Amino acid sequence: MLEQLAHLGRDPETGGYVRDAWSEADLELREWFAGEAGRRRLTLREDRNGNLWAWWGTPSPERPGVVTGSHLDSVRQGGAYDGPLGVVSAFAALDLLRERHVTPSVPLGVACFTDEEGARFGVPCVGSRLLTGVLPPERALALTDDDGDTLADVLKRAGRRPGGLGRDDETLAAVGTFVELHVEQGRGLVTEGRPVGVASAIWPHGRWRFDFRGRADHAGTTRLADRDDPMLPLARMVLAAREAAERRGVVATIGKVRVSPGNANAIPGLASAWLDARGADEDAVRALVAELSEGAQVREESWTPVVAFDTALRDRIARAAGGDTPAPILPTGAGHDAGILAAAGVPSAMLFVRNPTGVSHSPSEHAERADCEAGVVALADVLEELCR
Ligand code: GLV
Ligand code: MN
Ligand code: MN
C-alpha cells in the first residue's frame, strides 16, 4: 500500500512529499482511501469536517467502535511515513484480523483525519479539532493559505460544504476508543532495541506568528542610519528563541518566515516569523513565548495543552503489542490527532514504529519493512484485544 502511494505528491527533485490539505495530491490520497475501503467492503463516510471513516460494522452511540488510523497529508517536503504508515497499517491490521477469522464484538473503524500537519493553513489537526469543537468553524473557514485563499474557498472548490463544518457529536460518539499507529519521530525505540512502542504523553505545544513592521525602501540609496528594517528584530528574535529555549529546557523552532514584498534590492516593509515551541513543562513553554513576545506583535495560531494518555489503556496496549515483554512506553514532542481526541475525552492510545534515522518531517524519515510489519501485527493484536 505504501508503494501505491509513493508517487502521490512526491517532489522528484528532493524525494520529499508535498501533500497539502485539499491539494490535488490530497484529493488523490482520499480517493485511494475510498478505494481501499471499498475493496474491503467497509462502509465509507466523509464527516462534516472532511475526515474519512471506513467502518466494518455499524457504530451507534449505544455501540461505539474501536477506531484506528492517522492522516495522509504531509508537511512540505516531508517523508513517506508520517501519517500514511498509520492509515496503511490500519487497513493491513484489519486484513490480518480477517485472516485470523476474528469477528469483532464491536464495530471497527479506519480513520483518516484531514489536515493534520497544518502545512497549508497554519493550524495543525484541523479535522480533529473541528470534530471535537476546539477549533471554532468560523475561525477555521477564515484561515488563509499562501495564495490568500481561505479554507472556505478551498472547500467550495473541492465540492465540499463550508457551512457544514463544526463540532460533530454524532461522529464523535461512534468512536469508543482510538488507537493511532505512527512512525517514531525520534530514536527512543532504536535505543530500546524494540520495533514497536507505546506513547505515554504528548508535550504541550503551539505555534505563534510574529509580525515585524518596518519601512520599505531602496537597498542602495538608503543610509543605514535612516533605515527601519524589520529583518533586524526578526533575526534577534530567532537568536533569542534559541537562547531562551536552552535556558528554559524546552525546544523552539522558527521554520517559516515571510519577508514582504520580497525584493533582493529593497528593505522589506514586513517580516513575519512563525515560532513553534514545545516542552515537557507547559509553564516553561508559556514563559518562553511570553519572554519573546515582549514588545512584539504576536498572534497565537494554535495551542495544545499536555496530553497524558489513559494509563490503564496504555498499559493494556503495551502488553497486547509487546509479545513476551510489554512494549516500551515513550513520550513524544510531536502532535497527533490521537492527542486531540484524548483531550476531548475519547480513550486514546498510540503505537510507535521504530525509525532508524530518528529523523521526521524530512525525506530522511524511514521505517524498515520488517518493523512496519511488526507494527501491523502489534496493531492487530491490540485491536483484537480491544474488540473482544
Ligand atoms: C505534527 O507532526 C507536529 O508535531 O507538528
Ligand atoms: Mn507530522
Ligand atoms: Mn503525523
Image (cartoon, rainbow, N blue to C red):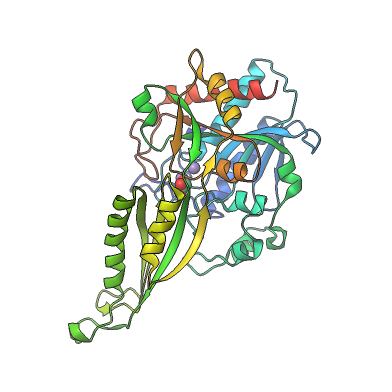
Where is residue 333 shown, x and y percent of the image? 43, 43
Please indicate whether residue 96 sits to the left or right of residue 62 in the image.
Answer: left
Which of 14 and 117 lies nearest the eye of the viewer? Answer: 117
Q: Residue furthest top?
A: 324
Left or right, 43 with respect to 332, comes to: right
At x 64%, y 17%, the residue is 99
Where 14 sits versus 312, above or below?
below
Q: Give the answer, above or below, for where 177 lies relative to 194.
A: below
Q: Nearer the viewer, residue 133 or 153?
A: 133
Give the total of numbered labels: 0
- Residue 52, located in which quarter of the rendered image? top right
Task: Give the x, y percent position of residue 233.
Answer: 29, 71
Is 94 drawn above or below residue 235 in the view shown? above
In what quadrant of the picture does the C terminus appear? top right
> Is residue 342 visible to us here?
yes
Snapshot quadrant of residue 241? bottom left
Q: Is residue 9 visible?
A: no
Estimate the x, y position of residue 195 in percent, counting from the top left.
Answer: 43, 23
Compared with 251, 321 (above or below) is: above
Q: Is residue 219 left or right of residue 361?
A: left
Residue shown at the point (67%, 29%) measured from the top left: 40
Residue at position x 40%, y 30% from top?
A: 367
**Residue in the picture at 53% in, 66% down:** 144
Residue 350 drawn at (x, y percent): 54, 33
**Residue situated in front as seen by the camera: 371 or 321:** 321
Would you say 63 lies left or right of 84 here? right
